[in-house]
Image (cartoon, rainbow, N blue to C red):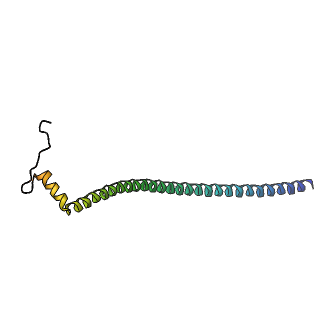
Amino acid sequence: MSAARDEKIKQLQSQYASEREKSQKLNKKKKKGLIRRLTLLSLVAIITFTVISTTLIRQSISIDKQEEKKRELNDKLEQLVTEEEKLNQQIENLNDDEYIEKLAKDVFKVSRDGEILLNSNKQGE
């Protein structure tokens, strides 16, 4: 009887041991799967972060270049507006008979009949 009892105990222990072993293998398999999923998720997150960061940096650089170009164009626009104002003033002056007469006297040394022009420029300088 004692031999039969020993066999039953061994069988129970081996059944418990095999179930415990199966449970441990299943836990290891689950743990491996979890590690693989976390690794894949981390890799996807790193790639996504890299792509987003790169895109933001490129856009920032592009915006800076466009703002610099805008500043340059605004400066050029201000110069052109100033030049336009000067040219409009010159057009207005050229429509004035007194200005044309003064210009003719100063630049082209033209005078009216009987009028004498004096040269105020010093030649020694």
Q: Position of residue 57 (x, y in %)?
A: 47, 53
How many marks are shown on the rendered structure? 0
Query: Viewed as shown, does residue 1 lie left or right of 72?
Result: right
Q: Quadrant of residue 23 in the image? A: bottom right
Q: Position of residue 18 (x, y in %)?
A: 76, 56
Query: Viewed as shown, does residue 101 lie left or right of 79?
Result: left
The foreground one among 22 and 30 is 30
Q: Position of residue 114 (x, y in %)?
A: 6, 55
Q: Residue furthest bottom?
A: 95
Q: Residue furthest front?
A: 114
The foreground one among 85 and 12 is 85
Q: Quadrant of the C terminus?
A: top left
Query: Viewed as shown, does residue 109 lie left or right of 4?
Result: left
Q: Residue furthest top?
A: 124
Q: Quadrant of the N terminus?
A: bottom right
The residue positioned 77% from the left and 58% from the top of the image is 19
The foreground one among 78 and 42 is 78
Query: Viewed as shown, does residue 100 lie left or right of 19?
Result: left
Q: Residue furthest left?
A: 113
Q: Quadrant of residue 38 in the image? A: bottom right
The residue positioned 15% from the left and 57% from the top of the image is 101
